[in-house]
């Protein structure tokens, strides 16, 4: 038994890679349709968006780049669809320079799909250099921070931004972030000073660090990773990439749990001598 | 489908497969993909910075709108580059002094207020609440509050190194270790979820690009990478793996 356990522990790790690949691939090809339970922190964001009156200003800061696309792109699509369906006025922007083109394509793409007009129903401000300084500057004068939008139109002359001089005029801000600058930056330099309500979306890696901000009410909700995106898609009622990926996510998690249990079992079966040999 | 989309799909598929080929072992396909990634990232960053910052935030407001005061931050920015000229390197200190001074002035009060005071406030919630219905001695919210309180205090004890961890201090610090372990476990679980999400994202696109619309890009390139790896392996000496 000890020998068998030892042999199993020294198996080529590429077999595990292969197993993970197969378990990820199968549910993507043949979806299982596992149920998705909506967590309170995701529902709070949805409920707040629902409570906003038509025409309210909603700022979505897409603070990520293509390396976090699988998690945050589906979130941005679900949030934008919800905002446009509610006839909110959407302001898109990014604090991440390498995410500028992707952020523009998602805002413009969902706006076009929802039949919204650029400059009237939505604007995309583009990238602002300086992270926290951009937020502080927007809190004082939005036109000075972004004299033109991404497409070169003067922000002060855009019909949608006529009444928007600073961040104080925005009803709800959500930052979808893959790190810093992101949700925390928006809270520290934005919400506390300028008083708008703030929600967050982040990669799963950053989620544990942001949960304390929900507990204290510093952010009103959080979409964490692909799971958060899938939950929001469920609430909006449009199954997208995140929902499609959740079966694969569950399957791989199940496999990893099994591997951890089995490997620990083999580890203890090797006996004291085997454990010493490592 | 446009030709650009088709080329983009083939390039994306090829590079994804090159990067995943590392799971077999380090190989020239992976190295090529890695170098292309670094080069493209830097190039893309430079182009976007030039257009979004230098042109839109500096040149246009200065030259077209006459905001000549922007010359001041421009000079401060240029002074940073003086570090590359040893004789003038001292000039860069002016810019760094400005950055450190303004940065600290902005960050310190905001961070203390947001991430320390408010978090401490969140830790000190009442265990017993008095409302219209009388005194609520113990609720699930109260259980959370108690857990947070015990967790914060015991972890602080663990990181308190000024006294020897013996007796009661040792026992409290031990509880702190358990809280830390749970926290590391949760963080690791989320990390696994994040990495799996990235894999799912890539697989999702690879499946999409395997369709006839994209000329079976994934299947063709997967076969090409496998053949390439076999050819590369056959051309290597047996000692290569050891050295």
Image (cartoon, helix red, strand yellow):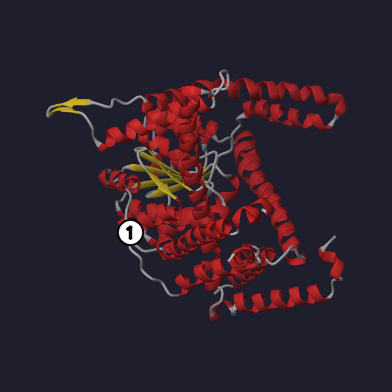
Location of the N terminus of chain A (image quadrant): bottom right
What is the total number of numbered labels drawn onto the structure image?
1
Identify the residue at image location x=39%, y=29%. Answer: B150
Question: Could you say where residue A206 lies in the image, as x and y percent from the top left?
Answer: 50, 44
Q: Residue furthest left?
A: B133
Please report the residue visible at 67 percent of the width from the left and 49 percent of the height from the top. B47
x, y percentage for residue A108?
46, 56
Left or right of residue A21: residue A89:
left
Q: Hey, which residue is sitting farthest top in the picture?
A: B162
- Quarter location, residue A167: top left
Residue B38 % position (x, y) = 71, 53
Closer-to-camera residue (B241/B48): B241
User: Dot 1, crowdedness within 10 Å: few (<14), some or many (≥20)?
Assistant: some
Give whichever of B38, A118 is nearer the camera.
Answer: B38
Spot occupied by residue A234 in the image (x, y as percentages of width and height):
33, 59
| Res B167 seen here | yes
- Quick one: A231 or B186, which is closer to the camera? B186
**Residue B119 appears left or right of A4:** left
Q: Secondary structure at mark 1?
A: helix
Apparent side of residue A104 relative to residue B8 in the rendered image (left or right): left
Query: Which residue is found at the position 38% from the left and 24% from the top?
Result: B121
As drawn, A186 above or below A243: above
What chain letter is assigned to the residue under label 1?
A
Residue annotated with mark 1? A234
Residue A163 is at least partly visible in this image: no
């Amino acid at each position: 038994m000890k020998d068998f356990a030892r042999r199993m522990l020294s198996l080529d790790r590429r077999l595990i890679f292969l197993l993970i690949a197969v378990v990820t691939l199968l549910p993507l090809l043949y979806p299982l349709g596992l149920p998705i339970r909506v967590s309170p922190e995701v529902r709070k964001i949805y409920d707040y968006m629902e409570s906003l009156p038509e025409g309210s200003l909603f700022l979505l800061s897409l603070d990520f780049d293509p390396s976090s696309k699988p998690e945050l792109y589906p979130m941005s699509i679900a949030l934008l669809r919800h905002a446009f369906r509610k006839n909110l006025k959407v302001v898109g922007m990014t604090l991440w320079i390498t995410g500028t083109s992707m952020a523009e394509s998602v805002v413009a793409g969902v706006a076009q799909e929802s039949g919204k007009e650029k400059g009237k129903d939505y604007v995309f401000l583009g990238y602002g250099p300086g992270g926290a300084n951009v937020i502080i500057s927007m809190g004082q004068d939005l036109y000075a921070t972004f004299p033109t939008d991404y497409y070169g139109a003067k922000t002060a002359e855009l019909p949608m931004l006529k009444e928007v001089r600073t961040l104080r005029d925005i009803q709800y801000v959500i930052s979808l972030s893959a790190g810093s600058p992101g949700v925390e930056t928006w809270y520290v330099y934005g919400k506390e000073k300028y008083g708008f309500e703030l929600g967050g979306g982040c990669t799963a890696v950053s989620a544990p660090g942001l949960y304390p901000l929900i507990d204290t009410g510093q952010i009103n909700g959080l979409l964490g990773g692909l799971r958060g995106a899938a939950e929001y898609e469920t609430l909006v009622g449009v199954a997208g990439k995140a929902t499609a990926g959740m079966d694969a996510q569950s399957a791989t998690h199940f496999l990893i749990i099994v591997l951890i249990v089995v490997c620990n079992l083999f580890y203890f079966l090797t006996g004291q001598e085997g454990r010493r040999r490592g | 489908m446009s030709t650009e989309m088709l080329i983009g799909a083939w390039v994306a598929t090829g590079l994804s497969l090159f990067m995943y080929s590392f799971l077999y072992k380090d190989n020239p396909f992976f190295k090529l993909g890695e170098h292309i990634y670094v080069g493209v990232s830097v190039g893309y960053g430079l182009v976007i910075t030039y257009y979004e910052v230098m042109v839109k935030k500096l040149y246009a407001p200065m030259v077209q709108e006459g905001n000549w005061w922007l010359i001041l931050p421009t000079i401060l920015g240029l002074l940073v580059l003086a570090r590359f000229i040893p004789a003038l390197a001292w000039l860069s200190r002016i810019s760094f002094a400005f950055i450190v001074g303004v940065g600290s002035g902005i960050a310190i009060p905001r961070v203390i207020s947001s991430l320390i005071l408010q978090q401490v406030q969140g830790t000190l919630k009442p265990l017993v609440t008095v409302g219209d219905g009388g005194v609520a001695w113990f609720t699930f919210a109260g259980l959370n509050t108690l857990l947070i309180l015990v967790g914060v205090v015991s972890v602080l004890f663990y990181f308190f190194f000024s006294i020897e961890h013996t007796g009661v201090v040792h026992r409290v610090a031990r509880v702190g270790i358990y809280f830390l372990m749970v926290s590391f476990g949760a963080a690791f679980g989320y990390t696994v979820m994040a990495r799996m999400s990235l894999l799912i994202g890539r697989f999702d696109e690879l499946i999409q690009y395997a369709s006839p619309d994209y000329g079976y890009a994934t299947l063709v390139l997967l076969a090409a990478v496998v053949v390439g790896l076999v050819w590369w392996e056959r051309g290597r000496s047996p000692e290569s793996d050891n050295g």
